[in-house]
Image (cartoon, rainbow, N blue to C red):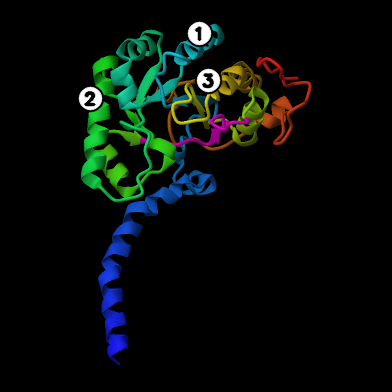
Amino acid sequence: MRHEFRAGRAVYAVAPVLAAALAHIGPAATWLPDLRRRRFPGLAGLGDPGHVALTFDDGPDPASTPRFLDALDGLGVRATFFVLGENAARHPALARELVRRGHELAVHGWTHDRPWWPSPARDAREVRRAVRAVTEVAGSVPRWYRPPYGILTSGRWAAARRAGLRPVLWTAWGKDWRHDATPASVRTTVAADLRGGGTILLHDTDHASAPGSWRAALGALPDIVRDCRAAGLAVGPLGEHGTGGVLVTPVTAVTGVSPGTTGTASFRSTAPGQP
């Protein structure tokens, strides 16, 4: 009887901790692509069915971001850059150059950390700090927020709302952060999930990715834009994307690029050594 009593007390003692942990991490289930597309289309980044939002995470980085700016200029495309506050503060001239070239700055947090332990005060403090850094270099208050790793905890969600930011994740990504990513693999992975009204996630730096992995995203970028245009889709920043759209014609139906395909004739890789 005494043993059972002690066990019961232990359960009651642990229960509030478990409840707090679940409340903290529960919203992170929106990381699951199918769930957020079906239940939270705005969070997934679904917008105008005739438009695709192009977004980049983790910069700015003087070693790689200028190359993306030049490539986007050549393509005549503007995008949304979810910058880390610490990087914007460290490289303010480059952050201002993003704005000067017509791109949109958004908030990706202050650092690229994983929020496993609840700390609402920390979340609020770091989001506010990042907003101030982005506002200072952009000359305007940012509208969008994407948490590092796409992990939207209750603390981060509340911090974004208090800061006046709208959380946006993505509907298609290139997995360009992997050490084995290539321009071909990035293009194929994006095409597998991309539809009109979708939001693409790429990275303009290897800040939180495998060293040099940004080259795969840069190499894939021209073909990704061409695939969208071939499907009759405009490409631009979230500010031009609208909300409440639905998924329509798959890009793969137009380009012939199917999941797992890396050697089709329609693939044109710009990375050295790629077929």
Residue, x 78% and y 25% (percent of image)?
Answer: 264
Magenta-colored stretch includes residue 106: no
Q: Residues within 10 Å of mark 3 (few under 14, many from 20)?
A: many
Q: Amino acid at mark 2?
A: Arg
Residue at the outermost bottom position: 1
- Is residue 175 toward the left or the right of residue 81 in the image? right
Q: In this orientation, which residue lies closer to the viewer: 37 or 268?
A: 268
The label on residue 235 is 3
Location of mark 1 (residue) = 70
Q: Which numbered disc, 1 or 3, marks the residue closer to the eye?
A: 1
Q: Give the vertical position of 91 relative to 202 (above or below).
A: above
Q: Is residue 37 above or below residue 273?
A: below
User: Which residues, given as a range, are shown in magenta?
Assistant: 167-180
Q: Is residue 68 left or right of residue 252?
A: left
What amino acid type is highlighted by mark number 1?
Answer: Asp
Binning the other alpha carbons within 10 Å of mark 1 as few (below 14), some (14 to 19) or many (20 upward) gives few
SS class of the residue under badge 1?
helix
Quadrant in which the N terminus appears: bottom left
**Whole-number angstrom distance, CA of label 3 to CA of label 2:** 28 Å
Q: Are marks 2 and 1 in contact (CB under 8 Å)?
A: no
Q: Amino acid at mark 3?
A: Val
| Label 2 – label 1 distance at C-alpha | 27 Å
The answer to whether residue 249 shows anywhere in this view is no
The secondary element bearing badge 3 is classed as strand
The label on residue 132 is 2
Q: Secondary structure at mark 2?
A: helix
Q: Earlier in the sequence, mark 3 or mark 2?
A: 2
Q: Residue at x 25, y 20 (%)?
A: 135
